[in-house]
Image (cartoon, rainbow, N blue to C red):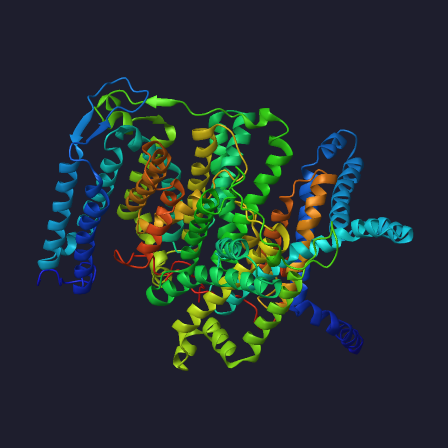
Amino acid sequence: MSNSDKAQEKKKFAGVFLDEISKSPLTVTILAIFSGLVLGGLLVAVTSEDVYAAVRVSFGETLRVAWDAAWRTYKALFIGSVGDPARIMAAFQSGDAEAIRRAVNPFFESLVQSTPYIFAGLAVALGFRVGLFNIGAEGQLFIGATTTVVVALFLKGLPAIIHVPLALLAGFIGGGFWGFIPGWLKAKTGGHEVINTIMMNYIAFRLSEFLLRGPLKNPEGYSPITAEIQDSAKLWRFFESPIRFHIGFFIALFCAYLVYLLLFKTTWGFTLRTVGSNPHAARYAGMNIVKSTVVAMFLSGGLAGLAGANEVLGVNHNLAVAFSSGYGFDSIALALLGKSHPLGVVLAAILFGFLRNGAIQMQLTAGIPIDIISVLQAAILAFIAAPAIIRTIYRLKEPEMDLDTITLRGWGGN
Amino acid sequence: MAETVANNHLTYVSPTRQRVMGVVFLGIGVVLWFLFARDVAPDALTTYRLTPGGSAQELPNWVFPTLPMLNFLIIFSIGLGAYQLVRGFGKRTNLVLGLVTAFFIFGFLSWATSGGSLNLAGLFRSALVKAVPLTIGALSGVLCERSGVVNIAIEGMMLTGAFVGAFVGSVTNLWIGLFAAVLSGGVLAAVLAVLSIKYKSDQIIAGTVINIFATGITSFLSAKFLQKYQYLNDPGRFPTIKIPVLADIPFVGPILFQHNMFVYALYFFLIALTVGLYYTRWGLRTRSVGEHPKAADTLGINVYRTRYISVILGGFMAGFGGAYFTLGSVGRFDEVMTAGRGFIGLAAMIFGNWNPIGSFGAGLLFGFFDALSAKVAILKVPIPSEIMLMFPYLATMIALAGVVGRGQMPAADGQPYEKE
């Protein structure tokens, strides 16, 4: 009797730590990412032709080849996103500046890819905190990029210190306006922001398409693309070619810090969060829900607009049709992954940036289509959205209270 | 006036709305004059051809002088507007709104065609064809949302259906391909159902998961296999079937009854779903679960089972709509080929007020603008096709804002049900 008690006591003691881990929401997040990567590996193995050839040999051979295929894929992903350690070592030993730049480029390129993700992720996260589902980051990004490119192209003779902030501001206002409309419609008419932002995405695509085929098209070219922006509007790059790492990354981090301050350190942010978590209580407390909704959607759209501005001013230096390729949509997944917290969003954005950049290299070296990262993201997002799946698979304990569940209001907008 | 303030809120027309609508009708008349009538030469003629391309029958062209027709439309619109302001059409306001909108479109077309000719029958036929995937997508949405589950994953389900249809159709035959496409839509819908009904995760997030997944997996598999082995992406298409007697009706026949099986399936689904939802026990139960699940549960209706069935049926429908792209229209799969039509389907469902016939109407309207945008280049009208293509989205936003009357959305749409 006492023996078993003692054993239980011991088990309890050792288990406290495990218990704590198993209840932590962070564990679910990490396991969700891990499970997503495992599923991605399985997908690679299942669709590999070598594996089917190996089935004819033996079961063991099949497993070995499948493992090999998944391993090669993730190795290519790692080297593509962080860089090849051996190559970096060799470059530093040789001391050739250009060789070093080429060797460390993958790492910095990943940060370049992360930058729009930080902006767009913050946009979606800010919306979530106010109970709004801004699915329109993609459209706001397009409009922000368009307004930015107008300022960056046609304003001439300004010093960079004025031109760059002005171009960024244009992107912020452009995207903000595109977010303001659904926010205003939601507040005034109750039209659900999910539907309105989806519709406005497509309006934005068509609008930018129209502008790029007409008024904004480079007069010297035939393709729907603008001319190169003024030198004074380009975001400053830290290194020489081929490293494209630019100051936008730090602007994004600064924005994340501002969003953190706004949400968690000001009365105003408290109002926004209250409106998000409990609109009835907020109304009872005399908070202005209409204003919160409109302002939050404006800020959210503005942040998404900055993502577009960042791509124009820092990376592409022009604007082309369909230049964004899904930053706005991916940002929904990463905002959820980051638990709608600015720090979480930054971490998730960096993860997504590395994944994306690695996947581009993976496509070239391992022949795995880049679209696999969408599958990874969907799997991770599914596990985040339904943490019960992860808890069941890994036999985690149910937390006492799930504070991180995203609460959104239904179609009816009440 | 006493009649318009009627016994229940559904037929009540507020005085503000009456006035707004009156001004809208007047406005359309004025715009017709300002934009079009002033611009037309007095002796210009408009020619409409009434035989679609590839049809056996020959109908004479419809030729009329442009200006008198426009003047007639203007006077009629202004007359309707004046009546609306003074007396009001009451319950029939929406009908009149539809009529005036049709006037506007007809006036625009007549002005654009003035001095040239336009194949009106071809335009209508093309509008119907373009409406097919939109309407089937909308019907998928109707099935899901009537039971209280928001489905923004129509796009993803259709894309998957398109891929599976093309792939399986190439390996086997068209009908098995179609069956597999329908099934694949159902599988994704089952995921949506489990996530949103069992795990009670947010339905919009669950839908987003499916959309991202569908885009990823179809592009991945397409890049890995279909582009490499062309014979895996060559399913062929369902043939056009001419319905014996009906297709010979002048004008209407070739537009409605000379299509492939998808169009006829659409007619069937429209009737079946309308009857099913509004005249059967199953429909009543499904709608009650979407409106007030707790009350339905109290009466012994299994809320979860009803929702599972509706969502999976909706998935079958979306998969069928997806198969249209590969097996009915293009004959091969291209990456992201649905290009947002699932979302326009969602819009058509909202615009059509969550009911099958309304969705079809909205689908036709959106399809019409899609078809028209392809013709504006020929008509040399100074409106870029991109602007024309914005119309469905703008119309949906306006409809949602309640300018034309607030839609009757299922009350429990999007809310997970927790049995107590």
Q: Position of residue A233 (x, y in %)?
A: 59, 58
Residue A407 visible somewhere in the drawing? no
> Picture quarter containing residue A410?
bottom left
Q: Position of residue A299 (x, y in %)?
A: 49, 67
Q: Position of residue A167 (x, y in %)?
A: 54, 60
Q: Give the residue at the far top of this rendering.
A: B56
B285 on left or right of A26: left
- How many numbered discs sit on the rendered protein? 0
> Picture quarter containing residue B111?
top left
Give the vertical position of B257 relative to B136 (above or below).
above
Q: Give the residue at the far front of this rendering.
A: A157
> What residue do we see at 77% from left, 48% from top?
A79
Q: Nearer the viewer, residue A312 or B150?
A: A312
Q: Nearer the viewer, residue A114 or A34?
A: A114
Residue A147 visible somewhere in the drawing? yes
Q: Quadrant of the N terminus of chain B?
A: bottom left
Q: Quadrant of the C terminus of chain B?
A: bottom left
Q: Nearer the viewer, residue A389 or B361?
A: B361
Give the vertical position of B10 relative to A54 (above or below).
below
> What residue do we see at 11% from left, 54% from top?
B82
